[in-house]
Image: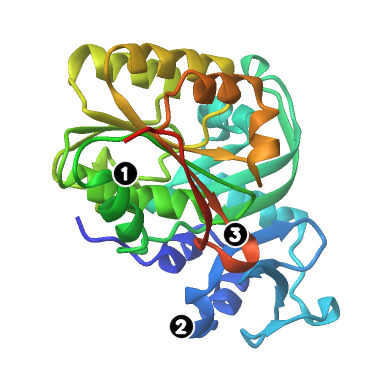
Amino acid sequence: MSRKNPFEVICRYIPMPFRDYIDKLNENEREKISEIRFRVNRPVTVTKDGKQLFITQSGKLSSNASFGIVISYEALNQILNAICSFSIHSYNRELSNGFITIEGGIRAGIAGSIGDYDTSNIKHITSVNFRIPREIKGCSDYIFNKYMSDKPKSMLICGGVASGKTTLLRDLCRNLGNRYTVSLIDERSELAGCCNGIPENDIGVFTDVYDGIDRERGIISSIRSLSPEIIVCDEIGGMADCEAIMHGFGCGVKFAASAHAYNSDELMKRQCISKLIEQSVFDYIVFLEGSGNAGSIKEIRSLCND
């Protein structure tokens, strides 16, 4: 299945005239935008090259908020209803988690006053943020060829917000999945970008995908049934994640994963991840530069002896 243009996908959920304003953005601008954010009674913003800018009625980007288009409560709720296929209560679980993943792996983050999903009490949605995933083929070639092409190894990719962790991990999955048997645990549907269960991103010919399942269950299920050489998963951090990874490590499975941490000191403060490192689960740790230079590698730390 060919990958759809993310702006075309997002615009299907945006009411007029805001759709027209966004549609006027030129292609060069679009390629550099990673987020489109709607906040009630405030200007619509985009994140471009790590900077916050405002969309004008003429389809330009401005650093001046007074030129930005302002979205109303009614229009924002039209967006929410469209995201939820006009059946909001069918998406209670997703809303309680704070995001809904739409076609192409685009994640719509939701903020506001959201009641417990068991009571179906959802009200006062005040923000919707579309995060645009990027396939950058080749961005992982260096680390794959240098560290992981000869035999399966484990790697942890670390960085802050918008540092390119997911983009790098997605391409690493492609490289790994073209050589090894890989299980991709895609809890937020951002890596494979599945639509109706079919990956829209290139994740490698030998990759099996668990889409929309939590990492703990996905890891255990893949070990039991798919015999992976490597398991790929994004944004590990909870104790349940780490216990499942330790189980896989004990079964001889390697892992390629990402974690939120700006540097080594911050990473080691996370007890569950520091335990994985102390138990020699990971052979390499990659630290990324940051949002101003997304995807750029700052440091690669080897933890293995060979």
Spatial separation of the CA atoms under disc 3 and disc 1? 29 Å
Q: Kindly indicate the quadrant of the structure image that contains residue 140.
A: bottom left
Q: Which residue lies furthest to the front in this view?
A: 305
The residue located at (42%, 19%) in the rendering is: 245
For label 3, the residue is 289
Mark nearer the N terminus (3 vs 1):
1
Q: Residue 51 shows which numbered tag?
A: none
Say left or right for 124 vs 205: right
Residue 103 visible in the shown view: no
The residue located at (70%, 37%) in the rendering is: 266
Q: Which amino acid does label 2 sit on?
A: Glu
Report if the CB atoms under discs 2 and 3 are less than 8 Å apart.
Answer: no
SS at circle 1: strand
Q: Nearer the viewer, mark 3 or mark 1?
A: 3
Say left or right for 124 vs 105: right
Spatial separation of the CA atoms under disc 2 and disc 1? 24 Å
